[in-house]
Image (cartoon, rainbow, N blue to C red):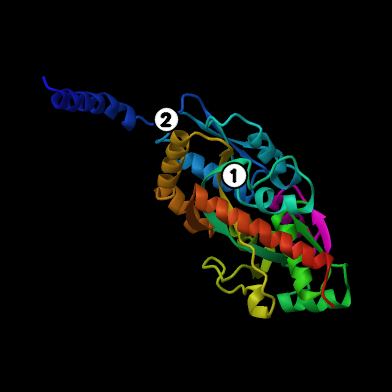
Amino acid sequence: MNTITKYATACLAWAALSQPALAQEWKPERPIEILVGFAPGGSADQIARQLSNAVKDTIPVPVIVINKPGVAGVLAAQEVANAKPDGYKLFIGGGSETTSVGNHQKIAYDARKDFTPILKAARLPSVLAVSVNSPYKTMQDLIAAAKEKPEALSYGSTGEGSLFHSTMLAFEANSGLRFLHIPYKGAAEATLALAAGQLDMAFGAPEEVRGLIDGGKIRPIALFSKERVASLPDVPTVGELGYPVALDNMKGLMAPAGLPEPIYRYLNRVFHEALDSPTWKTYAKNSGITTDYADGPAFQKEINESYALIGDSLKAIKNPKN
C-alpha cells in the first residue's frame, strides 16, 4: 500500500469514527430549573411556565419553574450568574434585571458580561392602567392632573430600578411631570393594588392586565411602546400624545457566562422550536404578547442597547437641560 493510499484510508477511517461524535448533542440528565425574579402571575412567570409546558414532550427531564422575587429580578439573576454553566440553571431575563437595575444601583453582576443568553422569546409593551373608578378616563386627563398636583399621583411598578420604574422616569424627563413611585415585588401585585383603589395608576404587560381589564376592574389608558398592540387596539401610545417614550420589555432565557457551545445549541434549538408549538401559539394569542425570537448573540446586543438607552435617560433626568 503506497503512502497516498495509506493516507486516504486513514482519512476515511477517521471520518467514520468521528461522524457519530460530530452528530452527538448534549442531553440533560437531571431537571432544568428556570428561575423567575418576580412573583407568580406576572409576565416573566407566565412566560417561564408556558415555555416549560411547551418543551415537556421534547426535553427528557422536568423543566421546573422557581419564583425568587426581589430587587426587580436581581436575586434570581444573581443566583444564575453565580451558578455552574452546565445548562441546569436558567432564568427569565431581558427586562429589569438585565437592562435597568444596574443603571440605578450597584449590583454584583454585569448583565452585559456575566450571562450567556439562550434566546429572546417575546416582547411586551408597557401598559399604563388606572382603576375603572378613577376620575382619569384618558392619559390626557392624568397628565392634566399631574400638572396641577406634582408628585401627588401614585404609580406602581415591579420595584425600585425596574424597567417599569425606568420607563416612568424617562416619561418624567420627557414631559417635565413628576409622580409618586410605589414599588411592588411584581406586576400582579401592583395591578391588584390598583384595582383595590390603592394606587392612581400602575404598569403591567398585556397578559398581566388582561384579566382585570376584562373583569371590569382596571382601564388601560396608554402604551409605552413604539406601536399599538392588537390585543388593546383602542389604547394609544404615549408617542401619539406627543411623548416619544418607548421601552418594550424583552423576555428570554439566559444561562451563566461560559456555557459550552453544545449546551447552548441544544437549549436554543428546543426552546426555539417551542415558540412554534400549539401550546405557545395559543398562549401568545390569548395573552397579547408578541413572539419575538432572537438567538443568543442578537439578544445580548438588544440588552446592551436597552441598558445604554436607560442609562442615558437617567443621566438626562439628573442633569436636565433648562
Task: Name the spot of residue 122 as percent of width and height, x first.
Answer: 53, 54
Residue 65 appears left or right of 56:
right
Residue 265: in sight, yes or no? yes
Disc 2 is placed on an element classified as loop
Tag shown at residue 26: 2
Residue identifier under label 1: 92
Task: Name the spot of residue 91 as percent of width and height, x first.
Answer: 60, 40
Residue 162 lies within the magenta run: no
Residue 201 lies within the magenta run: yes
Task: Name the spot of residue 121 as percent of width and height, x first.
Answer: 51, 51
Residue 160 appears left or right of 300:
right
Q: Which one is in front, 2 or 201?
A: 2
User: Badge 1 local density, few (<14 within 10 Å), some, or many (20+)?
Assistant: many
Q: Give, as a single range, the part of the protein colored magenta.
A: 179-202
Residue 134: in sight, yes or no? no
Which residue appears at 27% of the width and 29% of the height?
19
Single out the residue that lies furthest toward the top. 1
Q: Quadrant of residue 239?
A: bottom right
Q: Quadrant of residue 316?
A: bottom right
Single out the residue that lies furthest toward the front. 3
Location of residue 77 with respect to 223 vertically, above or below: above
Location of residue 149 with respect to 30 vertically, above or below: below
Disc 1 is placed on an element classified as strand
Counting the numbered discs, the total is 2
Residue 126 appears left or right of 161:
left
Q: Quadrant of residue 21?
A: top left
